[in-house]
C-alpha cells in the first residue's frame, strides 16, 4: 500500500493506505421487536390549545406571586376538566412553584428587614 497526501480543510496531510479485509455480508432482520434497529414508538404530543390562564399564571408568578398561585391552581382545574382539549399543565405547575418561591422570598425579606430595626 503506502502513504499518500490528501487535503484536509486547507492543509495537506499524509495518510497511510491500509488494506481492509473482505467482510462476509449477513442478512439481518432489523424489524423484529427485539432488534436494536426496530422503530421507536411514535411520540405523542398533547393536542389542543394552550390554556391562557396557565400562561397568565406564569407571568403573574413573577409580579404578584399570590395571583400566580391562584391562577395556576385555577388553570390546573380547567385543564383537568377539558378532557385533552387544552394543554399547559406544566406551565401551571411552574407558575405555582415560582409563586410559592417568590412569596416565601418576599416574606423572608420582610422578616429580615423588620428584624434589623
Image (tube, grey):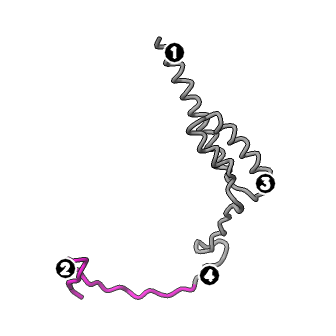
On the image, numbered disc 1 is attached to which residue?
A: 114
Q: Earlier in the sequence, mark 3 or mark 1?
A: 3
Q: For this view, does 105 lie left or right of residue 87? A: left
Q: Earlier in the sequence, mark 2 or mark 1?
A: 2
On the image, numbered disc 2 is attached to which residue?
A: 12
Span highlighted in magenta in the image: 1-27
Name which quarter of the figure residue 27 lies in.
bottom right
Indicate the position of residue 107 as horizontal and vertical percent values.
Answer: 57, 24
Label 2 to label 4: alpha-carbon separation: 43 Å
Q: Earlier in the sequence, mark 3 or mark 4?
A: 4
Q: Number of numbered discs present?
A: 4
Q: Secondary structure at mark 1?
A: helix
Indicate the position of residue 117 as horizontal and vertical percent values.
Answer: 47, 11
Q: Is residue 15 above or below residue 82?
A: below
Q: Earlier in the sequence, mark 2 or mark 4?
A: 2
Q: Who's the residue at 25% across and 78% down the image?
A: 8
Label 3 to label 1: alpha-carbon separation: 45 Å
Q: Residues within 10 Å of mark 1 (few under 14, many from 20)?
A: few
Q: Are marks 3 and 1 in contact (CB under 8 Å)?
A: no
Does the magenta run of residues contain 17? yes
Q: Secondary structure at mark 2?
A: strand
Q: Secondary structure at mark 3?
A: loop
Camera-nearest residue between 51 and 101: 51
Amino acid at each position: 500500500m503506502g502513504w499518500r497526501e490528501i487535503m484536509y480543510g486547507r492543509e495537506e496531510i499524509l495518510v497511510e493506505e491500509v488494506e481492509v479485509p473482505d467482510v462476509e455480508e449477513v442478512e439481518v432482520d432489523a424489524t423484529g421487536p427485539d432488534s436494536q434497529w426496530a422503530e421507536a414508538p411514535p411520540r405523542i404530543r398533547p393536542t389542543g390549545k394552550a390554556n391562557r390562564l396557565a400562561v397568565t399564571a406564569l407571568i403573574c408568578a413573577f409580579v404578584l406571586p399570590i395571583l400566580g398561585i391562584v391562577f395556576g391552581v385555577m388553570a390546573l382545574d380547567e385543564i383537568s376538566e377539558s378532557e385533552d382539549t387544552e394543554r399547559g399543565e406544566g406551565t401551571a405547575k411552574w407558575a405555582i412553584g415560582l409563586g410559592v418561591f417568590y412569596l416565601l422570598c418576599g416574606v423572608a425579606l420582610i422578616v429580615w428587614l423588620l428584624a434589623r430595626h
